[in-house]
Amino acid sequence: ATTTKATTTKATTTKATAYQQVQDGQSPMFFPVFESGLTTCRSQIDGTPASWLSVKDFKSTVSDCCRSYASNYDDCVTASYAAVRYYPDFRTMSCVSEEAGTPEDWIAGDYFLWNEKRCCKAFFASAESSSCKDLL
């Protein structure tokens, strides 16, 4: 029992020390966030990294982080800088920001895009009566 306690304490201390090294760095470091089928990269200023990340998982730029962890680099970079996601509202034939409305329960994953123009192109590019026409 004593050995287990010492091992657990050492592992916890090592993890805390590794995270502290990242926090004490001169510039923010970026870590991957996996949610809704999309990878984004955040700095420790923007949030708390998952507890399983180690120092080597942090990257010095959003670009390096997205290149290392995301399957779609462009979407990762765009989403990492975006503050608001957009989703299609098929009743009004428009794209709505999460700040402006609440999506239907079934809207998830690929229905969320990181800017209004991409949302409009993805869902209403061929629609004749869409409020997205001026963005296409």
Image (cartoon, rainbow, N blue to C red):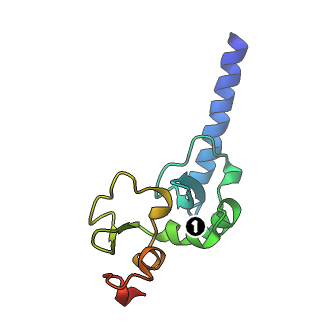
Q: Is the residue 70 above or below the residue 12 in the image? A: below
Residue at the (69%, 20%) spot, across then down: 6
* Residue 79: percent from left, percent from top: 50, 67
* Residue 96: percent from left, percent from top: 32, 70
* Residue 12: percent from left, percent from top: 63, 31
The quarter in which the N terminus is drawn is: top right
Q: In this view of the protein, can residue 84 be seen by the observer?
A: no
Q: Which residue is mark 1?
A: 76
Amino acid marked by disc 1: Cys
Residue at the (64%, 70%) spot, across then down: 73
Could you say which is closer to the camera, residue 58 or residue 35? Answer: 35
Residue at the (58%, 41%) spot, across then down: 51
The quarter in which the C terminus is drawn is: bottom left
Looking at the image, the residue that sits furthest to the bottom is: 134
Crowding at mark 1 (Cα within 10 Å: few <14, some 14-19, many 20+) = many
Q: In this view of the protein, can residue 17 be seen by the observer?
A: yes
Relative to 2, 75 lies left or right = left
Relative to 17, 93 lies left or right = left
Could you say which is closer to the camera, residue 119 or residue 41? Answer: 119
* Residue 71: percent from left, percent from top: 66, 63
Residue at the (63%, 65%) spot, across then down: 66
Q: What is the tally of numbered marks visible in this picture?
A: 1
Q: Is the residue 57 above or below the residue 78 in the image? A: above
Label 1 sits on a secondary structure element that is helix
Q: Quadrant of residue 103?
A: bottom left
